[in-house]
Each structure stands twice: as C-alpha cells, then as structure tokens.
Image (tube, helix red, strand yellow):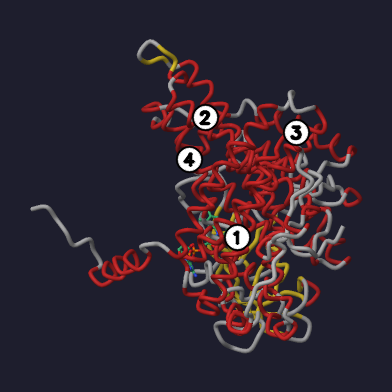
Amino acid sequence: MDTKVSFIRSLCAGEIEQDVVFPYPEMDPDERELLVSVLDSVDALLKDRGEDFRKWDVAGEMPPEFVDELRQFGLFGLIVPEDAGGMGFGNMAYSRTLQQIARHDASVAVTVGAHSSIGMRGLKLFGTDDQKARYYEKLATGEMIAAFCLTEAGAGSDAASVRTTAVEHDDHYLLNGTKIWITNGGIGDFFTVFAKTGAAGARSKMSAFIVTRDMPGVSIGPHEDKMGLRASSTTSVYLEDVKVPKENLLGERDKGFRVAMAILNSGRSGLGGGAVGAMKRLIALTAKYATERKQFGEPIGSFGLIKQKVGQMVVDCYAAESAVQVVAALSDRGYADYSVEAAIIKVFATEALWRTADEALQTAGGTGFMREYPYEMVMRDSRINRIFEGTNEVLRLFIALTTLNDVGQDLKEMASSLKGIFDHPIKGFGVLYEYAVRRASWATGVGTDKGSLTKVHTALAAETEVFEDLTRQLAGMADVVLRKHGKNIIGKQFATRRMADVMIDLWVFACVLSRVTAAIEKDGAEAVAPQIEIARTFAGQADQRVRQNLRRIDRNDDELIKSLAERTYEDLAYTWDVI
Ligand SMILES: Cc1cc2nc3c(=O)[nH]c(=O)nc-3n(C[C@H](O)[C@H](O)[C@H](O)COP(=O)(O)OP(=O)(O)OC[C@H]3O[C@@H](n4cnc5c(N)ncnc54)[C@H](O)[C@@H]3O)c2cc1C
C-alpha cells in the first residue's frame, strides 16, 4: 500500500483513494489480547470510584495516592515499548484504552492522555537511543510523569510566536521563559519544552528540549481553578536560567515547530478515543434515564423528540469511533502524512461529544442541571476538547488550506515554494495564487475509475453513490474556489470553513462505509442491520450538510455578518434596546 497518498487531497481532485480506508483496520490478535486485559484492569480500578471523582472535581485536585494507583496499574506505560517496561501499544490499542478510561472520568483520562499523547510522544517519535535509554523506563512506571510545554501568554494558536528562549553555550542551552496551562505541570517530572533557538525575533525558529523537574531553575505555578477537568493538574511551568544539556535536544535544532505538530498529530487518536468514551457513557446514562423517567404517563424515551436525540447520539458516536480507529491505524502503519485526517477526527469527535453532552443533559431535564448527577460534570469536562491541542477553528483552517494547497502539488514549478507549508499552512497558501491564474482547466478523477468507490458492500450501493457524487461536488468546488480566490483564500475564512466541513464529512463518511462493509462481510447484512441503518442515516445527513455548505460558498450573507461584527468592535457593545 502506498503510504504517501493523502485521501482528502485526492478527493479534492475527484479521486477516491480507497486503499487508505479499506479494508477497515483490525488489531493484531496479540495486541488485542493484551488490550482486553488492560481494559478489564481499567474497569476494575475505576468502576466504583464515581463518588471519588465527584469529590475531587469539587476539591479541584486528584490525591497523590490515586496517581500512585494509576502508576501501579501501569497506565503511564501504555505506549512505551515492552522491552523498556511498557505495554508497547500502537495507536489503535492506545486510543481504545483512553476510551475506556474516559467512560469513567475525564480528569483521569486527560492525566494519562497528556503523559502519553503529547508529554512523552516527542521522545517516542524523535528521541535518540540514549534519550530513550535514560527516560523510557521511568516514564513507563510513572516514576516520571510527562507534560507538553508549548503554550505561553502570547502564544496560543499562534504557537510559532513563543518567546521562551534557548541560548546555545558550550555543552548546554540556557532556557528562559514561562509556559502556561500545562496539563500534568503539577505532577510532572519530564517536560517537552519548546523554545526559540533562532536569531532574536518573535517568529524565529524554535527547538524542542527534554527538561526535567530536578534541573535548577525549573519551578511550577499553582494549580489552576478550571471550569472542567478540575481534578487534573494544570499549572504554569517557569524556566529561569535552566541549563539543559545538549544531549537533551529533541529532534533537530530549529525544527521544533515540526516536532510539536508531529506530536499533536500522532496524539490525536488518543483525544479522539477519549471523546468516544465520554459519548458512550452519556448514551448509557441517557438510555437509562429515558426509559425510567415517566411524564404524561409514559417513559420520556417513548416520545419522538427524545428518540431523535438518542438516535443521533448513536450515529455521532459510531461515526466518530469509526474515523478515530482508521486514523489510529494510519499512524500505526506508518503513513507519511495523515495530519489532515487526524485534525478531522479531533474536530468531529470533540464536537460530536459536545452535542451529545448537551442533549444528554437536556434529556435529563432539571435533573441534568443538578450537581448531584453526572451530566453537568461531563459537560464541563467536555468543553475544553474544542479548545486545546489546536482549537477547532484553527484546525478547520489547517484542514482546508493544507489540502487545497496540496492539491496544487502536482505542478512541478510550485514544489519549491511549497516547502514551508507544514510550518506555515496559512501563510504558505500564497503560492496557490500562481496556480490559480495559470491553471485553465482542472483535471480530475471524475468519470474515471479513480472516481469510483468499488470496495463498499453492495448493501450500501445507494450510500456509495451519494459519496461518489459528493466527491465530484467537492472537486468541482475546489476548482472554483482556487480559481476565484487564489492566494486570497487565506482571508476568506467563511469559505474555508465550509470547505473544511465538507472534507470532515467526507472523511468520516468513508470511514463509516468501510466499517459497515467489514461488519457485513464478517457477519452478514441481516445480523448487522442496525449498523447499516447508521450508515444510511449518516449518509443522508452528510449529503444535506455537504450540499448546503457547497451552495453557501457562493450564495451567503457573509458580508453582512462581517459588517455586523466590525460595527460591534467599533462600539464594543450591542447598541439596540426596546425602550
Ligand atoms: C485545561 C487546559 C489544558 C491545557 N493543556 C496544555 C498543555 O498541556 N500544553 C500546552 O502547551 N498547552 C495547553 N493548553 C493550552 C491550549 O492548547 C491553548 O489554550 C489553545 O492552543 C488555544 O490557545 P489560546 O487559549 O491562547 O487561544 P487563542 O489562540 O487566543 O484563540 C482564541 C480564539 O481565537 C480563535 N483564533 C485564533 N487564531 C485564529 C485564526 N487565525 N483564525 C480564526 N480564529 C482564530 C481560536 O480558535 C479561539 O476561538 C491547555 C489549555 C487548557 C485550558
């Protein structure tokens, strides 16, 4: 299989690279066996702790004794290779484990997840043998807990603007700066820190370093008082004249932005798994409540409006789970670049969870609002997912702009100008201007074999047709958008967002078709009828959303909305009243 093909990019050219998504990925049997026993341990550790999680949420802290229990259960060693004392999980098994933890508590999931998904992921992806020999075992046992230190007061979404400096000396770098909102900051000993190593200037190049808590000059701020994930540790990390040995440089010098993005990409199936776990919990809670609570002499679950909510939760959860698994598998199989698909699952799964949390609370009515019940806590805990590890707005820009830019890659003369695109997906888009004015016609896979989806089971023939048709629509619109806007697409965020939403729907749609096909092939269409219904429902909904988004790229009220926003910035208020 060609591991360099990008599914979404090909889709924009009207080509369906089905081998990326078909057959639906399966776990290695040995890994699966180990995973099942780990999931059992997770349940044994967490299942009767609801009262504790509630207490720690109110207190805003997780007791150190419980963190010790997580260590004893080996939950910090999930992705560390077996020969270094870990479980050696690939992303599929890792993501499924986070799903199981998140079914019990989000603060626990984020504590374990920040360690493996982002804290020590840089060591796994870029570490030298010496670095791994020094840290792997301690990270596997949880003797060292890891944290990822990128964000600063002036550098949130614009991560390249960090101001922490790393000045080179004979045998070390001297680090100075302040990182904020660092998950596991208060309990961490191993910090993946990003600092400027280029010439002076806000946007100069940065590098990644392994910094340990015992290094003189490292100190930690107080525990942040947060809306959700309250028991998980979030603190500032201060670096004051910290001497970091040169052998602690992680990856290549000046390539820190690339290191940070690779870590976040690779970790996204963990966050996606966590979101799916929380959705499964909410679905179980809602089903129970809806069947037990009676109004007007009937269980509320018998009413159409409640069924609509629960059915939609199931479709959203199945779709998110399907796509998370495919992205995890792409990472396990060594795909060269699945960053767009990874960004898609982050956006889709976190928004699906938010809708689910909202509808679960609504189904529970006033009960949902009471702190005595779990709904409000799950909702508070879920909210951050759309913000951290790349906000969903910035990820949408990344999805659409990177893809559309990549579409032009076949033009040889553009290749050199495209080099910086990974570091600067938004700025780098300027090269498309040339493409847009030169390209007179758009060669797409439409009408050829490449525009067909042949691997879907025939029981899903109608849905396959919908997918193929939407692909043609996307390819056509990509052409129109590129020709119309060229480099100015950077400033057209309304259009970019719609393109991103179309891409999100089509990637998730493809993953659902693949999963249901595998299910039919294994057990027969009759046995998996509910999954076929899910695929049908998703197909119908995606069809409507995609068409609406594409239609509104040209026909919309964007200028009116923009002008209302600009007017509000001038007044700094809503200026109308009824008196
Ligand atoms: C509980 C918690 C845990 C965290 N854990 C960590 C951690 O472990 N390590 C770490 O390094 N960081 C961590 N963070 C920081 C987190 O990653 C950042 O909050 C996030 O990247 C967004 O940055 P910001 O908050 O500065 O928002 P901003 O970047 O200021 O964004 C504000 C708003 O503007 C939008 N926006 C920004 N730029 C654009 C644009 N170009 N176009 C359109 N809209 C835009 C955003 O989408 C957002 O809606 C954590 C934060 C929280 C709250």
The residue beneath circle 2 is 310
Q: Nearer the viewer, residue 437 or 100?
A: 437
Q: Amino acid at mark 1?
A: Leu
Residue type, mark 4 in image: Met
Q: Earlier in the sequence, mark 3 or mark 2?
A: 3
**Left or right of 76 on screen, residue 159:** left
Q: Using the numbered discs, state the Cα–Cα distance from disc 3 to disc 2 in whole angstroms.
A: 26 Å
Look at 74% across and 50% down and name the residue there: 453
Q: Say which residue label 1 marks.
A: 474
Gap between marks 4 and 2 measured at Cα: 16 Å
Mark closer to the chain start, 4 or 3: 3
Three-letter code, disc 2: Val
Question: Of discs 3 and 1, which sits in the foreground?
Answer: 1
CB of mark 2 near ligand 1 (< 8 Å):
no
Labelled disc at residue 39: 3
Residue 141 visible? The answer is no
Which of discs 3 and 2 lies nearer the camera? The answer is 2
* Marks 3 and 1, the one that precedes in the sequence: 3
Residue positioned most to the left:
579
Give x and y (percent) for residue 252.
77, 77
Q: Residue 540 sits in which quadrant? A: top right
Tell me where residue 151 appears, x and y as whole percent: 56, 66
Q: Secondary structure at mark 2?
A: helix
Q: CA distance from mark 3 to mark 1?
A: 40 Å
